[in-house]
Amino acid sequence: MTRLFVNVDHVATLREARKTVEPDPLMAAQIAEKVGADGITVHLREDRRHIQDHDVERIRAAIQTPLNLEMAPVEEMVQIALKTRPYQVSLVPEKRQEITTEGGLDVASQIEDLVKMKDRLQSGGILFSLFVDPDARQIEAAAKVGADSIEINTGAYSEIKGGLEIEAALEKIRQSATQAAALGLHVFAGHGLTNENVQAIAAIPEIEELNIGHHIVARSVFCGMEQAVKEMMASVKEISVHDVGQA
């Protein structure tokens, strides 16, 4: 069954709009966990636009499910990860002016540096994942680095409304998932996924885990966090059960 990690970044985005104490991303994480999410994801950005250092510490200490810490491949973040000891670190690229992550990490251009970072984090008992575009060169590089897993960027797929383009985008993701699994990498996916477009991604056999945040938080404004997480779990579970039955 495909696992669902709920990203609570944008609960913190709403809080930081007023620089107050609510809504609390820890409370959102605990609700997601209570209704069956398999894990929690937070992205501690260098500019601290939403999640703050104390959020990482509090969530890590309070939840019972695994914490996936997304972060830029920089020394400051490595130090924070080694201090807080999340279950997993996922390296993502960051640009100061971007609204959200705009693409995958260019692993191929920094293999040596990423190997050193990977060794330090893995020696601390932390799983090491790389957020990459569905690109054969980058996936091959991730295997050379020795990553435990990759997360395939589904952003381009999520922006397409339909037609032949969406099938082409899906095929790229399928091919990337197959390639990564053949290289011994665990395969995850995320970015821009919604209740409406997640089924086709969850149906890809090699994809073990999904990271979804913005859509869940957006839905929660209208129906509550508990219901929003349940809806996403149902969307993922429905296609996963169907897919298993067809296998």
Image (spheres, rainbow, N blue to C red):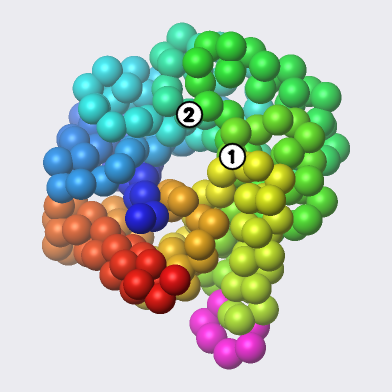
Magenta-drawn stretch contains 226: no
Kind of residue indicated by mark 1: Ser
- Left or right, residue 128 beside residue 44: right
Whether residue 6 can be seen here:
yes
Q: Nearer the viewer, mark 2 or mark 1?
A: 1
- Left or right, residue 4 beside residue 44: left
Quadrant into which the C terminus falls: bottom left
- The answer for how far apart the CA atoms under marks 2 and 1 are is 10 Å
Mark 1 or mark 2, which is nearer the start of the sequence? 2
User: Which residue occupies the foreground of this view, 43 or 33?
Assistant: 33
Count neighbours of disc 2 (C-alpha within 10 A) and say few if under 14, some if 14 to 19, many if 20 or more: many
Q: Which disc, if any, is residue 215?
A: none
Contact between marks 2 and 1 (CB within 8 A): the answer is yes
What segment is highlighted magenta in the picture? 160-165
Count neighbours of disc 1 (C-alpha within 10 A) and say few if under 14, some if 14 to 19, many if 20 or more: many
Considering the whole magenta stretch, tell me its main secondary structure: loop
Residue 62: image x %, image y %?
Answer: 22, 22
Whether residue 54 can be seen here:
no
Residue matched to label 1: 149
